């Protein structure tokens, strides 16, 4: 493909290709515990432990690929991108 002289020609022996990969991951964990000790009569004691754990996982991946010799990809870096549209919900 030759775009440098203003004309668009297509080389059918060459393969055009576009690829984009993006990844994102988030993880956190919260642990909350409470211990209660009480001494009872006669030398006895009681210990109680309670707690809660919160675990949050999130992930996102975008993988775009195109390969076709009919694609006209200009020889200009301003056109070498794929827009990523995210859902606001």
Image (cartoon, rainbow, N blue to C red):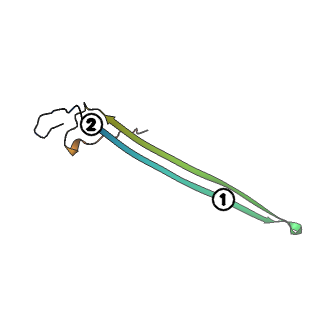
Classify 10 Å Cα crowding around label 1: few (below 14), some (14-19), many (20 and above).
Answer: few
Select label 1 or label 2 by which is in front: 2
- Residue 8 at x, y percent in the picture: 15, 33
Q: Which residue is mark 2?
A: 16
Q: Quadrant of the N terminus?
A: top left
Q: Residue furthest front?
A: 13
Name the residue rendered at 11%, 37% in the picture: 6
Residue occupying the point 58% across, 56% down = 30
Residue 16 in the image: x percent, y percent? 27, 36
Image coordinates of residue 37 in percent, x first then y, are 76, 64
Q: Is residue 83 visible?
A: no
For label 1, the residue is 33
Residue appearing at x 87%, y 69% in the figure = 43
Left or right: residue 53 versus residue 69 is right
Q: Is residue 47 visible?
A: yes
Q: In the picture, which quadrant includes the C terminus?
A: top left
Question: Disc 1 versus disc 2: distance between alpha carbons?
Answer: 58 Å
């Amino acid at each position: 493909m030759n775009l440098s002289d203003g004309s668009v020609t297509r080389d059918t022996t060459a393969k055009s290709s576009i690829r984009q990969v993006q990844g994102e991951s988030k993880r956190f964990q919260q642990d909350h515990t409470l211990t209660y000790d009480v001494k009872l009569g006669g030398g006895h004691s009681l210990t109680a432990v309670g707690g809660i754990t919160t675990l949050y996982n999130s992930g996102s991946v975008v993988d775009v690929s195109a390969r076709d010799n009919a694609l006209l990809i200009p020889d200009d870096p301003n056109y070498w991108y794929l827009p990523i549209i995210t859902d606001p919900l």
